Amino acid sequence: MAAEARELHVLSGGAVQGLVAALQERFTRDTGAVVQARFGAVGAMKEALLGGAPCDVMIVTEAMVAALQADGVLAADGGSAIGRVRTGIAVRTGEPRPDIGTPQALKAALLAAAALYFPDPQRATAGIHFASVLDRLGVRESLAPRCRNFPNGVTSMRALADDGLVGAIGCTQVTEILATPGIELVGPLGGDFELATTYSAAPTTRAADPALARRFIDLLAGAATGAERARCGFQADAGSR
């Protein structure tokens, strides 16, 4: 009887889903280990980890990784920054791209939108930020009936693509927009509304095979896959927040 394939369990923020999908077959080919990955809002992934979900590698924001390392949940060594992800605006493929270049233009575009698709404003990085942008523009209350929230950015963007609502706008992290067929990136939020988040990966202290976990992290964050990270929407880390 053939031996069962080893499994590497990953909990990850949705912003990294496209990169994991692009590299997991290479990892399996090189190591014989199958990646079992679960994606979602970073807050939900933290809850899953602390709730005992199987996890060898955690991929969330740099700040959350540092906090979990300080708590002894993630290994203090073996972690790496994957890159910086900006938050952006999306529309359905082929639809006009609104002007979002100034606060006034962004406000006008949001007020004109048929609906706004964005992730959980309580637990998702981009959702929390976009809700604050709506507050700062003074439009959150008036737009509330048109806001369509989902557990994470990936499901938000899939709904934007699939619902077929003409004139709808989405907001989430650029990596999630680029990974979703049927939608296009209008551009990142700029000026005072910009949010650029660095994502990092680290082994958990309960990883079944710490060496295998670190090998996966090296694949995600190493120099050899820099072009893949750029294609997925990651930028080299340069002092994000």
Image (tube, helix red, strand yellow):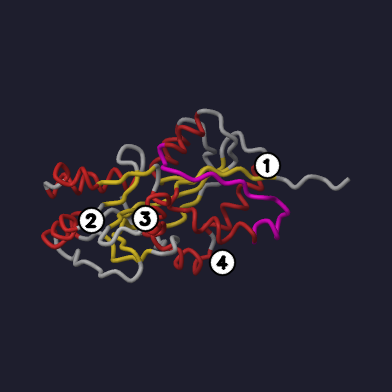
Q: For mark 1, give the secondary structure.
A: loop
- Which image quarter is the N terminus in? top right
Percent x, y for residue 22?
55, 61
Q: Which-is-in-front pick, marks 4 and 3? A: 3
Q: In this view, does 228 lie above or below 110?
A: below
Work out whether mark 1 precedes mark 3 in sequence or the reverse, and give the earlier one: 3
**Residue at the spot of label 1:** 209
Label 1 crowd bin: few (<14), some (14–19), many (20+), radius 10 Å: some
Work out whether mark 2 precedes mark 1 in sequence or the reverse, and give the earlier one: 2
**Residue at the spot of label 3:** 163
Q: Which-is-in-front pick, marks 1 and 3? A: 3
- The region drawn magenta spans 26-43
Verify whether residue 210 appears in magenta. Answer: no
Q: Which-is-in-front pick, marks 4 and 2? A: 2
Looking at the image, which residue is at 31% across and 51% down? 117
**Residue at the spot of label 2:** 114
Residue 29 appears left or right of 137: right
Percent x, y for residue 30?
70, 59
| Tag 2: amino acid | Ala
Determine the CA span between mark 1 and mark 3. Answer: 42 Å
Determine the CA span between mark 4 and mark 1. Answer: 23 Å
Q: For mark 4, give the secondary structure.
A: helix
Circles 2 and 3: CB distance less than 8 Å? Answer: no
| Tag 3: amino acid | Asp
Residue 200 appears left or right of 20: left
Determine the CA span between mark 4 and mark 3. Answer: 38 Å
